[in-house]
Amino acid sequence: MSELVVITGMSGAGRSTVAHAMEDLGWYVVDNLPPAMLATLCDMSSVTAPQIAVVIDVRGREFFGNLSEALSEIAERGVARRVLFVDAADDVLVRRFESTRRPHPLQGTERIVDGIAREREKLREVRAVADVVIDSSALNIHQLELKVAALFRDDSKADLRVNILSFGYKYGIPIDADLVMDCRFIANPHWIPELRPLTGLDAPVSAKVLDNENVQDFLSGYQALFETMATGFFQEGRKYLTLAIGCTGGKHRSVAIAQELAARLNARGVVGEKKISAAAIHRDLGREL
């Protein structure tokens, strides 16, 4: 088996969407597997399914408590395993459960927020050791699928896959970011009438942003900072990394900078002797009123 990904996280955060996206990418996906059966699944699938994704969560009730022990067991067998944790803000989770009129699996006779609190406590240790954390609070289903595809696409044999996430500060800082950079020092195209309706994906906006004073120095410095940190991430065995680039609304500056930085990293392709690949994802594009 080349890789095992364990998908876990908060109920209502989008675990099913993540599982479906990975299935579309060609992974063999198993839903709601008891942790004690992970090792058996690895033995059964080592030849026929080299890439397996397994959804394990609190639906397993008392079996879920064995997850840490099961992860340690398969690590001892030499299986390359990753833990993907899907999260969302509490208020977002409450709205999602209310909209579907379904109870939280741990709320019992109490409120939804009580079930969420219990689940967070049960998942606290797993989240702390997760290799990848995806915050779906501001993502629709399509955006979440795109983010998963960017992380787990198999079009390269990269040692490190970098997700460059543009966002708007007025919508909150992404909780799944490994590194956050602020590009609000760049003159805002929003104040230029002919550029206001466009986005950082449009050539006029991109050119305006990239031609600003000090922007090229900023990009070169940020790339150098990333490459310095990447050396340590390789030593820690990290395979996925999220770099967040923020501006006020996530429409112009951060989008253009994220696109340019992804292009630069892909053009370089390596850090030391390690291969890297990058993809730009735009969390808040199209969200402005």
Image (cartoon, helix red, strand yellow):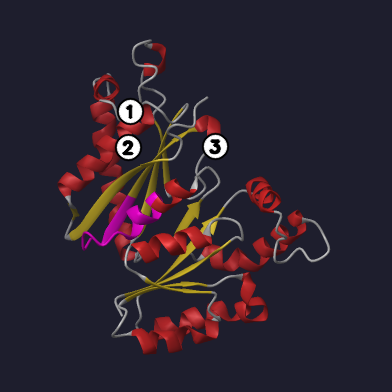
Q: In this rendering, is residue 228 above or below 237?
A: above
* Magenta-span inclusion, residue 149: yes
Q: Residue at x 30, y 22 (%)?
A: 205
Q: Nearer the viewer, residue 56 or 185?
A: 56
Name the amino acid, label 2: Ala
Q: Seen in the image, is 50 located left or right of residue 100?
A: left
Q: Seen in the image, is 206 located left or right of residue 79?
A: left
Tell me which label, 3 or 1, sits earlier in the chain. Answer: 3
Residue 144, how many percent across, how many down?
A: 45, 50
Q: Which residue is mark 1?
A: 200
Element under label 3? loop
Q: Which residue is mark 2?
A: 258
Tell me which label, 2 or 3, sits earlier in the chain. Answer: 3
Q: Which mark is residue 172?
A: 3
Disc 2, disc 1: CB below 8 Å?
Answer: yes
Q: Seen in the image, is 102 located left or right of residue 52?
A: right
Name the amino acid, label 1: Gly
Q: In this rendering, is residue 170 above or below 76?
A: above
